[in-house]
Image (cartoon, rainbow, N blue to C red):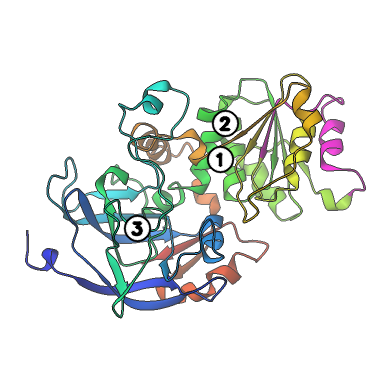
Amino acid sequence: MSKSSSQVITCRAAVCWGMGEVVKVEEIQVEPPKEGEVRIKMLRASLCHTDILFSQGFPVPLYPRVLGHEGVGMVENAGKNVQNLKEGDIVIPTYLGECKACENCKSGKTNLCETYPMSLSGIMPDGTSRMSVRGEKLYHSFTCSTWSEYTVVNANYIVKIDPRIALSHASCISCGYTTGFGATWKDTKVENGSSVAVLGLGAVGLGVVEGARAQGAAKIIGIDKNEKRSAKATVFGVTDFINPSKYDKSISELIKDLTEGKGVDYAFECAGATGLLNEALESTKLGKGVTVAIGAENQHIVEINFLSLLTGRTLKGSIFGGIKPQSDLPLIVEKCIKKELQVEELLTHEITLEDLSKVFELVKQQDCLKVLIKI
């Protein structure tokens, strides 16, 4: 271990100081990794809708916090007893672990590992933080905090990836897009010839569209109020586009109009608008329709039309699209390398770490899908 790798590093990071406050780029201190941890030099990061929610206090208002959970970096220093990771490895920090041995990992039904669960505490497993600013503790975002030149992550939440993948693509598949893609592949296993509705055509929704196309869906209906999303959605595989603001009918009625009144086999709510969940449910087929809630928002309690469920429809949630980090994420990396996925089409804006204070304004632009951050 070099002398520098065992020392505290001073670097820049995007810090949110309070609920709804403008993100500021600050000089922070990042400690060396403890046993079972890795310090990563971040190379690229990107914006996911959940980062906006974190800045607004979701799910718990913990401040000051280093934001960011999408990104790719290089191992700078591996702590004691870290297996299969070494200096120079290209890695993706994740917010889910995978032990492959617990009941959940072996069940084949979920990607939520019991041994290495998703953490919302903002601190490391030992109850402390590896980041500080002017002597004050900084909270992490999940187990990641990728909007920093350096970050420390528990080794169980790191995936080593093939370095042939473009760094920009690796960042994009580290959460949003893969969540959508995986929801059709792992969470629901959309069947060949089936019909799908996607409510919200951001990065997550377009991941759903591409996943549904790859699974062989015959009809993929994309719904978004942003008319500019129509052309992009077609590239990913949408067969029918609906801008609901142009009609007096409900979204579920518009979807049924395109499916002979029956509705779709699968509906994916990707906008993070809880009011759309009932529309998604109503848009699916009686007796067998499945609705997947993917988008998140600060409202934790939602009213659901019980009659929609009583008539045989299913509503389920999805975290990271059912993707298991160690088992499945490398397969998506391989698809990117082989150019089987349209990830490049997601990249609409690129900024540097110094410009991060503008990122939440950029995402409001109608042509914005994914903001890439050069660290």
Q: Magenta region: which residues? A: 247-268
Residue 143 drawn above or below residue 217: below
Where residue 215 sits, quadrant-wise, is top right
Mark-to-mark CA distance, 2 and 1: 7 Å
Residue 46 drawn above or below residue 163: below
Three-letter amino acid code at disc 2?
Thr
The residue labelled by disc 1 is: 180
Q: Residues within 10 Å of mark 2 (few under 14, many from 20)?
A: many
Q: Earlier in the sequence, mark 1 or mark 3?
A: 3
Relative side of 146 to 57, left or right: left
**Is residue 22 one of those drawn in magenta?**
no
Q: Earlier in the sequence, mark 2 or mark 3?
A: 3
> Quick one: which residue is furthest to the bottom in this view?
134
**Is residue 260 one of those drawn in magenta?**
yes
The residue labelled by disc 2 is: 184
Give the numbered dot on residue 123.
3
Q: Element type at marker 3?
A: loop
Relative side of 245 to 284, left or right: right
